[in-house]
Amino acid sequence: MSSVRRFAAPLAIYALTRALSAVFVVLAEPGRLVRMENIPGYHSTVRARLPADYSTVMTSWDGQWYWDIVAHGYPHSAVDAAGVPVQTSLAYFPLYPLLVKGVMAVTGLGFEVVAPTLSLLLGAAAVLVVFRLVEERLDRRRALGCVALLCCFVSAPILQAAYTESLALLLVAATLLLLSRRKYLWALVSVLLLGFTRNIALALLPVVVTHWIVRTRQRTDADEPDRVPHGSLAVLTLGTLVATLEWPAVAGLIAGRPDAYLTTVKAWPGFTGSAFRPPWAAALSDAGATAWLMALVLLAVLIGLLRSGPVRRWGPELWAWTAASIGFLVLTTSASTSLPRYLLLAFPLGLVLMPGTADQATQRMQHGAVALACLVGLGTQWLWVSELLVFAGPRGGLGFP
């Protein structure tokens, strides 16, 4: 099958769903009558147009921080005059705004055009890599299903906004694909780039270690021994740690204090300085015993699912990344409206709807389950766009005129 034919279907799914997301934004944007810069805690780089248009919506929220980095660079302090931690752009990683700034310089176009467009294109590349990864590890049928579920996920519209989700998804999927192909030094490149994109490189550490263990334990062919390149895998393992420290180290140099990154992050709600005190623990404690019970049941179901035979047959890369990414979120992320965005990177989880089978009737049932999940996802996308992304104020757009 030619490359054009192979990738036509996933690209079509991506294009159609992104067009639908754009329609959602256009339909919801007349409700945006809020001066976002007047909302306490909202960082504004440019004054939003009202009523909002598409580019205003897609460069709002964290997009304003990236616009600030492109326009003004990074600040040289993470504290105010009294030494109290403050929210600064040092909390935002530099690779995405650097790419945006480069494209702006080449094209002469503004941030409001370049940033959403670049995210859209990076998202398309990410979807193709996700498709290729699942196709190689499993099969084309499940690869298309995984792409459809990813593109219909509640927060998938963020793939066309001025956010790092598209770039992070591309680099994570590329790392997993290169790891599965045993291209360890090339995987190191994508890991190091991820370290300048999002603070999730550490979640790849158990993935690399799991791959290393599985490959070491595999039986080798008697005529052609499959030597394990322990040196390359050791370098890649070390690379995940280096990538985790890359931006905090650079931010420390910019601000003149080694803890500048962690200092500015403390100014955001839900910060915790220890994985032994995850933000979820405080939220559950406030909610009471019933919430703890529900959380423990959910955790038990998730662990049972990840330990099941069909999931383990995904291969060490897809299986370990699903477990590691969700575990990373539980240990480091608070319960907030950002959680759907973070879960976007746990894309293999959708494969639980498609266990491997050769039975045609079972496959049709799986296709029906995927189609239903996609419809539900698109419905929640509309709610996510209209209620969160296109914020209309506490009184339906009448607030903060």
Image (cartoon, rainbow, N blue to C red):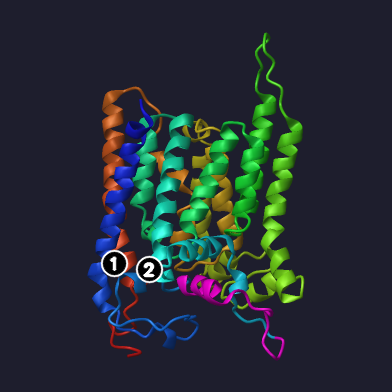
In this picture, residue 343 sits left or right of residue 199 = left
**Image quarter of residue 270:** bottom right
* Quarter of the rendering occupied by the C terminus: bottom left
Residue 76 magenta: yes
Q: Please, what secondary structure does the residue beneath circle 1 have?
A: helix
Inspect this view and state whether residue 161 appears: no
Q: Are marks 2 and 1 in contact (CB under 8 Å)?
A: yes
Instruction: Kindly identify the residue that appears in the image at 40 percent across and 63 percent down.
Output: 116
* Quarter of the rendering occupied by the N terminus: top left
The residue under label 1 is which amino acid type?
Answer: Val
In this picture, residue 77 sits left or right of residue 120 = right
Q: Position of residue 216 (x, y in %)?
A: 70, 27
Q: Hey, which residue is sitting farthest top in the picture?
A: 223
Mark 2 sits on what residue? 58
**Image quarter of residue 112:** bottom left
In this picture, residue 236 sits left or right of residue 155 = right
- Which range is magenta? 63-83
Closer-to-camera residue (198/208): 198
Inspect this view and state whether residue 179 appears: yes
**In the image, residue 286 above or below residue 380:** below
The residue under label 2 is which amino acid type?
Answer: Met
Instruction: Kindly identify the residue that appears in the image at 37 percent across and 26 percent down.
Output: 357
Instruction: Kindly identify the residue that appears in the image at 47 percent across and 74 percent down.
Output: 64
Q: Position of residue 322 (x, y in %)?
A: 53, 45
Label ID, residue 25: 1
Q: Position of residue 4 (x, y in %)?
A: 34, 34
**In the image, residue 297 above or below residue 75:** above
Mark 2 / mark 1, whichever is N-terminal: 1
Residue 74 magenta: yes
